[in-house]
Amino acid sequence: MPCAVKWILFDFGGVLAEEGFTGGLGTLAEEQGLNPETVQGAGVELVFETGYATGQASGQTFWKALGDRTGLQGSEKDFRQVVLDHFIYRPGRIPGADQGLLHRAVSR
């Protein structure tokens, strides 16, 4: 009997891939001698407070706010690259892909 399920949605960060946002923030903090937990906590708060998570603010706005709050210094481009580099795909995390089911990953 054919499967009635046609689509499967997955979260990307923390499910299909390592959580790159907090991992990247931790690395950035360590590289600058800052407390990783402080920078990660501020990042999680500010991604919503600034409106960046909902598309109401730019990356530049978010990273400036994070730098102002934590002392993190550097360019938006460099920060973004470190975060993206921490999203490491976890192979074999998409059940049903070998059965012809369509799948998409979602993330904030």
Image (cartoon, rainbow, N blue to C red):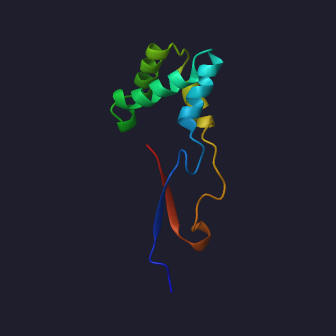
Which residue is at a point 46% across and 20% down the rendered structure image? 66
Q: Nearer the viewer, residue 14 or 2?
A: 14
Viewport quadrant of the C terminus: top left
Residue plotted at (51% across, 22% down): 38
User: In the rendered image, which quarter is residue 84 located in?
Assistant: top right
Image location (x, y in percent) of residue 101: 53, 70
Q: Image height check: is 9 above or below 72?
A: below
* Furthest residue in direction bottom, as rendered: 1
Q: Quadrant of residue 14?
A: top right
Residue 83 in the image: above or below residue 31: below
Q: Depth check: 60 or 22 in front?
A: 22
| Residue depicted at x 45% and y 31% | 44
Left or right, 57 with reference to 69 = left
Examine the image and state in which quarter residue 51 appears: top left
Task: Say if 57 sits above or below 67 in the image.
Answer: below
Residue 87 position within the rendered picture, expressed as x and y whole percent measured from the top left: 60, 41
Q: How many marks?
A: 0
Residue 24 x, y percent position in the rendering = 59, 31
Q: In the picture provided, is 5 more to the left or to the right than 80? A: left
Residue drawn at (57%, 23%), measured in percent from left and top? 36
Q: Position of residue 47 (x, y in %)?
A: 41, 30
